[in-house]
Amino acid sequence: YEDPLDLMDEIDELKKEKDATILAHFYVDGDIQDIADFAGDSLKLARDATQVETSTIVFCGVHFMAESAKILNRKKRVLLPDLNAGCSLAESCQYEPLKNYQEKLRAEGHDFLTVAYINTTAAVKSLCDWIVTSGNAREIIEKIPEDKEILFVPDQHLGRYLSEVTGRKMILWPGACMVHEVFSLQDLNRAKRNNPESQVIAHPECPQNILEVSDFIGGTEKMRQYVKSIEKPTTFLVATEAMMIHPLEKLAPQHTYVPVPGIITSTGETCACNRCPHMALNTLQKIRNCLRDGKPEIEWQPYFQKAYDVLERSLLQ
Ligand code: CIZ
């Protein structure tokens, strides 16, 4: 066991010594978000990464995020505290099956553009025309010419939601996020009943039945803006990764936040199934170790150049 406060001091020292900047996603532990130089969603962090002046970036998030930071900053050393921090969505859509599916669609006469959620590998990004995040998806889809069909990968729930709000028909890849997929309508309805007057804020990666009973739908940054815009103390039932409550509490402490499903056990304990096991692999100890040892590192790969073109056009212009 190592004292978290000692680890934080050590990380501060190592950051200076190794010329490093720490970026942390809203889904990692609150302690890590607090010691980070930048915290945010993947859109903001991809942009922040391009402003970093130090020679090293430590990306506290999951693999595709650190990979995107490397792609956008080829000359920097990008470290990920645990290389096993993957993503169920990225996993669900691999390079070969997507390439084959695109070829099949073309052979059938479809005239389409491929839009990928950022939760994909660099190899998959290199097959796509646009990359979107929950923060800019609508804006990018609205720019796509009406005469083109859209193949949306890999999140079927986000794709269905975007198709509904933009009015664009989409061919959907059958992927889903392991965290958002498991919220149960019954648990949510129980939480609503136990918290009268509450509002449900849900991530668009949730299935349709959850979105249908939600008062606000948006990615993590949009959730922050929404709770901040409400002055009256309110109880929010939060249907996304449970660590998101940390930045919400910091930004708008007048409210009460209940994770969904946050009250399902009879003993009053919260359920751990709304934590992403990959994001949870980021710990203070591993951050200290990766700063100290200079690894694990995301190495530049030849196919990153094609992924750079699409990422740069989609997120930075
Ligand atoms: O875009 C991101 O960072 C993810 C994975 C969720 C969100 O809405 O911020």
Image (cartoon, rainbow, N blue to C red):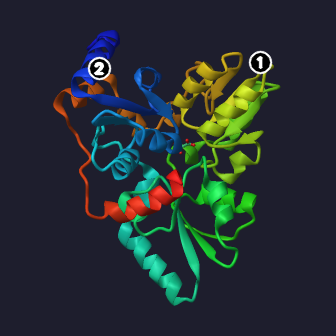
Q: Please state the horizontal and vertical placement of residue 183, each as a whole percent of the image.
A: 61, 42
Q: Of the residues tagged 2 and 1, which is closer to the observer? A: 2
Residue 224, relative to residue 46: is it above or below? above
Residue located 43% across and 32% down the image: 24
Above or below residue 272? Residue 73 is below
Q: Which quarter holds ligand 1? A: top right
Q: Which mark is residue 298?
A: none
Residue 125, position in %: x, y?
42, 62
Question: Which quarter of the figure is the N terminus placed in?
Answer: top left
Q: Which residue is labeled 1 in the image?
A: 233
> The residue under label 1 is which amino acid type?
Pro
Q: Does the beta carbon at disc 1 come under 8 Å from ligand 1? A: no
Q: Amino acid at mark 2?
A: Ile
Do we see residue 249 in this rendering? yes
Residue 206: image location, x then y, percent:
62, 48
> Residue tagged by mark 2?
11
Q: Are marks 2 and 1 in contact (CB under 8 Å)?
A: no
Q: Is residue 233 left or right of residue 52?
A: right
Q: Which residue lies most toward the left here? A: 293
Q: Which of the 4 quarters of the picture holds residue 29? A: top left
